[in-house]
Image (cartoon, rainbow, N blue to C red):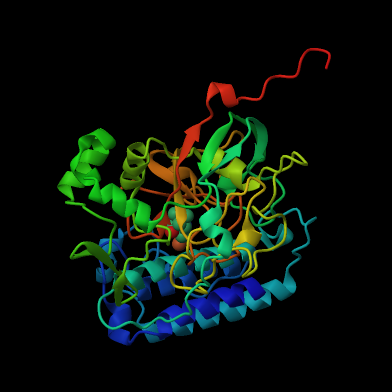
């Protein structure tokens, strides 16, 4: 229940900050009006907690179709017969009352045979669902024009050793355990745990910064097709891209709009609001490549000392403010090299938090995947259309951010809080020699 309550406080923070007209407005054709997300949160809780888990009639089954994300694309949602902000708030509160009642009456022990209830999975699923829509609403806030309404303290400055970090860390080759069969609130696409053999590679210690990305722009990176995939080049020309979303030229330098405030681009912060094509082109310009999803997860979870995969880069302890920039505590990524206590065994930092990280991988099921509890959570998205993002950004809740969590989006998406880091193959000479027979 604590996880559901935390999600609700954040939902309120994001929707109480703006007036009624603002909640109903469509700030971008890419996004729903905030009031759609708000009522959708309640509608999903009505469906999955009150009806499916609680076995009750539910409050407003008649609203299911209005708030079905598959029925109406975001651009068309303002035309739906939406609840008013006042009605939506009352609906969420009424659903939550029944949720509390369901929780008090059902058996959520891990031994419970109903998978929806075992380990309180469905409660965790709905807390994560609400937090994911809160992140979507945060992206809507970043897109909206007008005076700023959100505020948060700046992240702490980079630690003294940030400038001394090696540019890349080495991940030795060999198998590791990818995915999970034990994480209680893992979603279907993270299951099951399975062995993957990942050849040795090198990974950037920290995400690519604004400063590094600005060098790519200054070197004419957006004008040279050699760095881009054919689809990426077609898109960059057609959409007229010449810098990350929200950047504006300012003489020799750049400014960036951050939740309604314009500021100089901070050179030492991870770059954010780039699409997969831009990340991929930068990597090629830098003589490198994006990491695969398996490489990313091995760097984030594999502990060479024990051979097991951790829940988080730093170990199994729940994320705290010392580990990672999560939970909308700050409204921006922290400087590259921050969070030494959140480092992985390899020494890589900021794998969780700060910015989502594009990987080179398409979104695909793990061997043994089974859709649960509904096909539309993951299964319908598998295939070449979506690229996987890992790690989670500053606006991702700790209840969502974990080493196994998988996010996905179209390679053209830029309004999400996405950045990246780069990788390269190990040179043959760097490969550890096999032990001599009989050794
Ligand atoms: C996992 C972030 C791609 O927002 O489309 C929300 C999460 N699924 N409601 C999305 C989700 C259903 C999903 N992403
Ligand atoms: Fe949803």
Viewer-proximal residue among 175 and 44: 175
Q: In which of the image's four quarters is ligand 2 placed?
A: bottom left
Up-down relation of residue 340 to residue 233 (above or below): below
Q: Residue furthest right?
A: 438
Q: How many marks?
A: 0
In the picture, measured across the screen, residue 405 lies left or right of residue 336, that is right
Up-down relation of residue 382 to residue 122 (above or below): above
Q: Where does residue 251 sit, x and y in percent of width and height?
A: 18, 65
Q: Quadrant of the N terminus?
A: bottom right
Viewer-proximal residue among 344 and 394: 344
Is any part of residue 1 visible from this angle?
A: no
Up-down relation of residue 29 to residue 357 (above or below): below
Residue 273, image quadrant? bottom left
Q: Where does residue 21 sit, x and y in percent of width and height?
A: 27, 84
Q: Where does residue 371 sit, x and y in percent of width and height?
A: 56, 45
Viewer-proximal residue among 50 and 167: 167
In the picture, measured across the screen, residue 212 lies left or right of residue 183, that is left
Identify the residue shown where x is 41% and y is 36%: 288
Identify the residue shown where x is 57% and y is 78%: 96
Identify the residue shown where x is 42% and y is 51%: 208
Identify the residue shown where x is 45% and y is 66%: 135
């Amino acid at each position: 229940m604590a996880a559901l309550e935390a999600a609700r406080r954040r939902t309120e923070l994001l929707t109480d900050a703006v007036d009624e007209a603002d909640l109903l407005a469509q700030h971008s054709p890419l996004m729903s009006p905030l009031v759609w997300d708000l009522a959708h949160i309640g509608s999903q809780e009505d469906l999955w907690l009150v009806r499916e888990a609680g076995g009750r009639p539910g409050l407003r089954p008649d609203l299911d179709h209005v708030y079905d994300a598959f029925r109406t694309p975001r651009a068309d949602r303002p035309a739906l017969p939406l609840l008013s902000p006042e009605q939506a708030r009352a609906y969420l509160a009424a659903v939550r009352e029944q949720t509390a009642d369901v929780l008090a009456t059902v058996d959520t022990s891990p031994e419970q045979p109903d998978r929806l209830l075992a380990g309180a999975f469905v409660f965790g699923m709905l807390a994560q669902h609400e937090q994911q829509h809160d992140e979507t609403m945060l992206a809507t806030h970043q897109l909206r024009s007008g005076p700023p309404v959100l505020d948060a303290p700046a992240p702490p400055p980079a630690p003294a050793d940030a400038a001394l970090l090696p540019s890349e860390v080495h991940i030795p080759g060999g198998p590791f355990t990818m995915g999970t069969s034990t994480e209680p609130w893992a979603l279907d696409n993270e299951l099951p745990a399975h062995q993957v053999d990942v050849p040795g590679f090198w990974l950037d210690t920290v995400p690519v910064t604004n400063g590094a990305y600005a060098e790519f722009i200054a070197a004419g990176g957006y004008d040279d097709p050699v760095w881009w995939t054919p689809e990426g080049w077609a898109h960059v020309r057609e959409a007229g891209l010449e810098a990350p979303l929200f950047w504006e030229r300012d003489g020799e330098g750049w400014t960036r709009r951050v939740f309604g405030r314009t500021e100089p681009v901070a050179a030492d912060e991870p770059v954010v609001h780039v699409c997969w094509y831009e990340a991929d082109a930068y990597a090629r310009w830098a003589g490198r490549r994006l990491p695969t999803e398996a490489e990313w997860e091995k760097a984030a979870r594999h502990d060479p000392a024990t051979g097991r995969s951790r829940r988080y880069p730093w170990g199994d302890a729940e994320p705290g403010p010392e580990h990672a920039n999560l939970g909308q505590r700050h409204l921006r990524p922290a400087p590259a090299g921050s969070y030494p206590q959140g480092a992985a065994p390899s020494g890589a930092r900021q794998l969780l938090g700060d910015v989502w990280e594009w990987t080179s991988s398409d979104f695909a099921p793990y061997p043994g995947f089974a859709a649960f509890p509904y096909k539309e959570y993951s299964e319908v998205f598998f295939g070449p259309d979506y690229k996987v993002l890992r790690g989670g950004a500053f606006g991702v809740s700790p209840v969502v951010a974990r080493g196994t969590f998988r996010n996905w989006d179209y390679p053209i998406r830029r309004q999400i809080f996405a950045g990246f880091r780069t990788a390269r193959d190990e040179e043959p000479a760097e490969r550890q020699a096999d032990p001599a027979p009989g050794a």
